[in-house]
Amino acid sequence: MFIDQAIIYVKAGNGGKGAVSFRREKYVPKGGPDGGDGGDGGSIILETDHNLSTLLDFRYKKIYKAPNGEPGMGSMKNGKNGKDIIIKIPVGCIIKDAATGEVLADMDKDKMRFVVAKGGKGGKGNVWFATPTNQTPRFAEDGKPGEEREIFIELKLLADIGLVGFPNAGKSTLISAISAAKPKIADYPFTTLEPNLGIVRYKDFNSFVIADIPGLIEGAHQGKGLGIKFLKHIERTKILLFLIDITSEDPSKDFEILKNELESYSKELTKKDFLIALTKADLADKERITKLKKSKFYKTYQPLIISSVARIGLTEMLDKLWEIISNQSEKKF
């Protein structure tokens, strides 16, 4: 089951109370203060783990509390700190304050850590409060309370390439043909009900990640079909690969509808590099392909003609995608 958002409550530990204590030594009837400090409360820390791909765990556990710091003791002994709680989350999570909607962190790298609730500081023991006029202070400092908050965790998939197309355009078939991912495939719309990630091995030593997003329909940006629930996963992809059924009555119109849905959801999506592939070439006759190549749509965008089943044009498509990925990497330096 793919879960891409969750709300949890986190409470860091309180700091331990400082100790009120005095030295008790033989022949020293009025020893000075020796109360130790209280320990710090444990913090709640989020850490990304590339082995995770869903927020399913938070469906069953929604409350996380870290231990309090222990109180200080005599003989200048400090209390133990409360143990931090580390919560593992998938790479690509955005952390928000559930009450205000403020973005607290964008966890887009593996092993990235964020202290979402800091433990309270331990209180100082009475040894810190001795003065020339009060050499036997009979008070110490209370520990500070740990932070607590309700947080909203939203997962947005991280991939180099996002597949965009209508339901049953051949996205799942393509990802199964070029990667080790095995999504459900059938000849009816909305076979894909959750995003799938596939790692594509390119030539000898290179690889990239491709995301199979559930199919879009006209009005998706308004929530129709599976709409907004999955459009957000395209936001983090570097390249968009539009897949259009070559047997469609009007491939050019299909592309315009898809492009409009992305733009209506976020104009930033239209700024991404993209490639168009006409799928199911094995089902098209030569006459149809010849007619398509003479169209304004073909001359403008130079779409690739592919078939995942017959493995037509896949090598050329991967070469093109890798070229775009490489160019993007070079622009960063």
Image: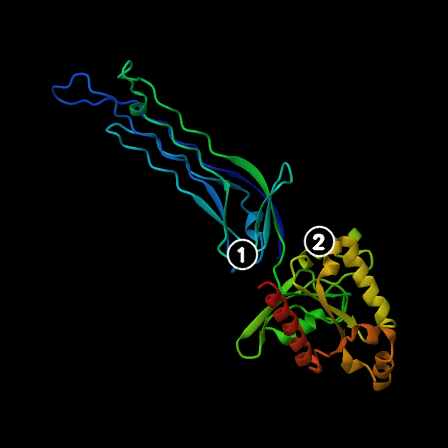
**Residue 260 location (% of width, % of height):** 81, 59
Point 63% across, 75% down: residue: 178
The residue where tag 1 is placed is 109
Which amino acid, mark 2?
A: Lys
Q: CA distance from mark 2 to mark 1?
A: 23 Å
From this view, report whether residue 192 is shown above or below residue 295. Answer: above
From this view, report whether residue 236 is shown above or below residue 41. Answer: below
Give the crowd class for mark 2: few <14, some 14-19, many >=20 residues within 10 Å.
Answer: some
Quadrant for the C terminus, please.
bottom right
Viewer-closest of 224 and 97: 97
**Residue 15 location (% of width, % of height):** 41, 32
From this view, report whether residue 40 is shown above or below residue 45. Answer: above
Point 33% across, 37% down: residue: 80
Looking at the image, tell me whether mark 2 or mark 1 is earlier in sequence order. 1
The residue where tag 2 is placed is 229
| In contact (CB < 8 Å): disc 2 and disc 1 | no
Q: Is residue 243 left or right of residue 84?
A: right
Q: Is residue 80 left or right of residue 328?
A: left
Viewer-closest of 318 and 88: 318
Quadrant location of residue 62? top right
Q: Is residue 49 left or right of residue 183?
A: left
SS for tag 2? helix
Point 15% across, 19% down: residue: 28
Quadrant location of residue 35? top left
Say whether residue 198 is visible: no
Point 50% across, 34% down: residue: 147
Viewer-closest of 73 and 328: 328
Which amino acid, mark 1?
A: Lys
Viewer-closest of 138 and 228: 138
Give the crowd class for mark 1: few <14, some 14-19, many >=20 residues within 10 Å.
Answer: some
SS for tag 1? loop
**Residue 64 location (% of width, % of height):** 50, 41
